[in-house]
Amino acid sequence: MKKIIKNIGLVLSGLAVLSSCNDSFLDRTPTHDLNDNSFWTTANDLKTYNNGIYNEAGNNNDYMFLLGFTNGAWSSNTHSVFAFEAQSDNMASMSSRHQWATKIAAGQEVVPNDAGRGGWKWSVLRRINVFFQNYQKVNADETIINEYAGEAYFFRAWFYLDKVQMYGDVPYLTEPLNTDSPELYGERMPRKMVMDSVLRDINKACEYLPLDWDSDSPSRITKGAALALKSRICLYEGTFRKYHNLGDHEKFLNEAIKASEDLMALNKYAIHNTGNPATDYTTLFTSEDLASNDEVILYRKYQTGVLGHRLCGYIMANVVGVTKDLVDDYLCLEADGTALPTGLSAVYNDNSIEDVLTNRDPRLTQTVLDPRQAHDIFFNKDQYEYPILDGMKGNKSTTGYHAIKYYIAEQDKKGYGKEDHDAPLFRYAEVLLNLAEAKAELGTITQADLDRTINVIRERAAMPALTLNPPMDPKYADEGISSLLVEIRRERRVELSFEQLRYTDLMRWKWGKRLALPVLGMRFEESDRNDPHFADISDRVKTVNVDGKNYIDVFAGTDFENRVFDENKHYYHPIPVNVISKNPAIEQNSNWE
């Protein structure tokens, strides 16, 4: 069924926030910590107070879990969902603006002195806990009160998911602290206990939040968004516990299944599929308004004159590239109608970049530029031929594979701070992938499960259906997992690339070692340097021989050439020095001393 989403009236601050099913909000009036009894009297007080939670959670100067294209044009450059991919094995960036992420990927993160953006910051939690301290003072219908409580439970669960993903054990607080609160000097709580509390919170959110808000409040978090968040939380925690040998993983995987199936049972969401596999996927990331897209459960709203971004301009301006490792994971379309990994394909060859992009999953050329389509895609770039490497004129790629997901020329034309297409945060496709993976991890998946999850997503891309016993991709044959799980993880990587999930996926699967692999780009032989197209190429473009072929070695000769991943250290981030100096009970994560 179609969603009809109405826009909330524009209010005071400059923070764009989210949009949820039947729900689209831009700005909300911020509030302070209103503890006095004269405030907590009506349901409208709860609504007004929660507006401040929305705004603060969406302030990407402090928090990065509610991200999208960020709440400022410059931040679209430095900390958007696109920039985040430089932490992972999907994107290679040589931009100084992404160095924070490139250092993490290369194993060069250091202990910070202070809490940086998205780090050890807690003010939004205090705001949430002030709500819980006061909300029951309100004289209103219990159902209405609980709906606003559901919002607070939703944000507390999302906040703590982010903190646990970063630090593991963290203080778990349910009361607003003051300067004399003894909890300020308390210890970190074991992550399993924290995540058990997160599960309780998100269950409350799922129970209390409405399917839709009334016409006076059309733009708030709904039950569908809570179920999508629960699905994400529980898959993350279940697989993290399994692969890091923490025990008791089945509970969370079963909860991931339940949340996913409960969301599906709402019959409110569907894979966006108009029968055009060449563009349907792109539409999800280049639409000015996602309000009517049935697949998008939660998105960040941008609007001209209220809040804009500059993502498209920075996609073009920054020196980044999609990695060979990601490109290799898109399946090849064989002559017999099947789809196979590159290592098993009869049609795959990499004699040229055009050959690489031919006979592949259509999502590849909706994520990576096909040079043959460049002049149809880019704005004001007709004087250039692609690919463009270091030393050449034009917007350069580190790998030769130019990223185009989220790029739309009409937005690029608008200029700094004026781009206003919306950013999806939760999609129905992710929920279907979560369901398939959780069932596969528990060993309960059936062909019927594949047909209602992954194969619905593949149908949008006109890709052959996945079966229970696919051939093993040689690339992953030594990973110790089934060929089916390989394909489910592949589907997740391909479908959800550049959506702020790949890094946490690697961490939960205990696949951090993949970040230590050399970062390669397209095939580039020495003879290619004689091609007139590459006449101005820099000597800084290095190659490495792999099985008799040369590929761009992105970080050769740079500070990020010798990549490491310490299995005893890098699954968590370091806690800032000043945090521990203020509270010695907060111990540093292992091997970060």
Image (cartoon, grey):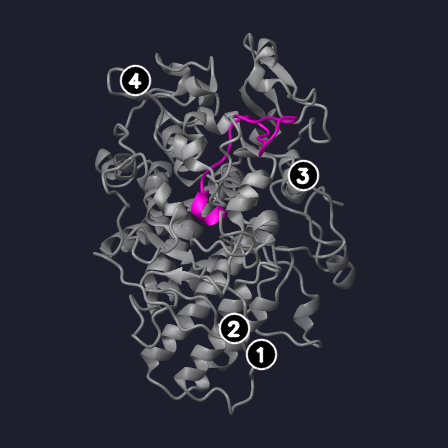
Look at mark 1 in the image and give the residue it sits on: 32
Q: Which mark is residue 52?
A: 2
The spot of residue 236 in percent (x, y) is 46, 46
Badge 3 crowding class, 10 Å Cα cut-off, few under 14, some 14 to 19, many 20 or more, is some
Magenta segment boundaries in residue numbering:
387-412
Residue, far front: 383
* CB-based contact (under 8 Å), mark 1 and mark 2: yes
Is 566 situated left or right of 233 in this image? right
Q: Residue at x 33, y 84 (%)?
A: 141
Badge 1 crowding class, 10 Å Cα cut-off, few under 14, some 14 to 19, many 20 or more, is few
Q: Secondary structure at mark 2?
A: helix
**Residue 409 lies in magenta, yes or no?**
yes
Look at mark 3 in the image and give the residue it sits on: 103
Quarter of the image holding residue 417? bottom right
Q: Estimate the spatial distance between the alpha carbons at disc 4 and disc 3, rounded to whole Å.
A: 39 Å
Q: Estimate the spatial distance between the alpha carbons at disc 1 and disc 2, rounded to whole Å.
A: 8 Å
Nearer the observer, 493 or 239: 493
Nearer the observer, 383 or 558: 383
Q: Quadrant of the N terminus?
A: bottom left
Is 573 situated left or right of 466 in this image? right
Q: Amino acid at mark 4?
A: Glu
Look at mark 4 in the image and give the residue it sits on: 334
Badge 2 crowding class, 10 Å Cα cut-off, few under 14, some 14 to 19, many 20 or more, is many
* CB-based contact (under 8 Å), mark 3 and mark 2: no
Mark 4 vs 1, N-terminal side: 1
Q: Quadrant of the C terminus?
A: top right
